[in-house]
Image (cartoon, grey):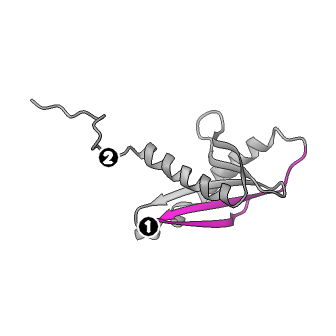
């Protein structure tokens, strides 16, 4: 009987590893553009909450909530199509939770970084809070 070892060097990366690598790429891209990291993988407490991949600050003080999406191909609409209304609502919920710690609200926006076919696309103000 032969057992496979999940720790073998030739095994495929896990979904988490692929996601972390995509976030690393997005973070480098944003930092090269002059943004500063405030938080990574910010989660609201409890079930059904939201998560924000990256929370960044622009040089002008704008807080930027960033969703990172990676897709190996553009079939089924690609990475941008995977950010539906429900996902946007969870990001907005998490951003409101994050902003509760501020005495005065800074200017904010919601950006998306798309990683497809080896390319990085940055969609500034990709959606609004509703």
Foreground: 71 or 121? 121
Mostly what secondary structure, the magenta segment? strand
Left or right: where 130 falls relative to 89:
right
Q: Which mark is residue 117?
A: 1
Task: Please say if 3 is above or below 62.
Answer: above
Q: Which quarter of the rendered picture does the C terminus lie within?
A: bottom right
Foreground: 4 or 34? 34
- Please state the extent of the stretch shown in magenta in the rendering: 104-130
- Residue sticking out furthest to the front: 32
Q: For residue 55, say whether it is visible.
A: yes
Q: Residue at x 63, y 43 (%)?
A: 40
* Label 2, label 1: how far apart the Cα atoms are: 18 Å
Task: Please say if 91 is above or below 79.
Answer: above
* In the image, residue 74 lies in the stretch drawn in magenta: no
Residue 84 appears at what percent x and percent y?
56, 61
Residue 6 appears at what percent x and percent y?
29, 35
Left or right: where 68 falls relative to 104:
left
């Amino acid at each position: 009987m032969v057992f496979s070892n999940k720790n073998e060097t030739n095994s495929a990366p896990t979904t988490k590893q692929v996601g972390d690598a995509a976030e690393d790429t997005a973070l480098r891209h944003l930092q090269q553009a002059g943004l500063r990291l405030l938080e990574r993988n910010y989660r609201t407490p409890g079930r059904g909450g939201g998560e924000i991949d990256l929370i960044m600050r622009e040089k002008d003080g704008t807080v930027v909530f960033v969703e990172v999406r990676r897709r190996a191909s553009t079939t089924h609409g690609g990475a941008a199509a995977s950010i539906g209304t429900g996902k946007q609502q969870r990001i907005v919920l998490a951003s409101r939770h994050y902003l509760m710690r501020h005495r005065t609200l800074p200017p904010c926006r919601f950006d998306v970084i798309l990683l497809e076919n080896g390319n990085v696309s940055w969609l500034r103000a990709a959606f609004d809070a509703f």
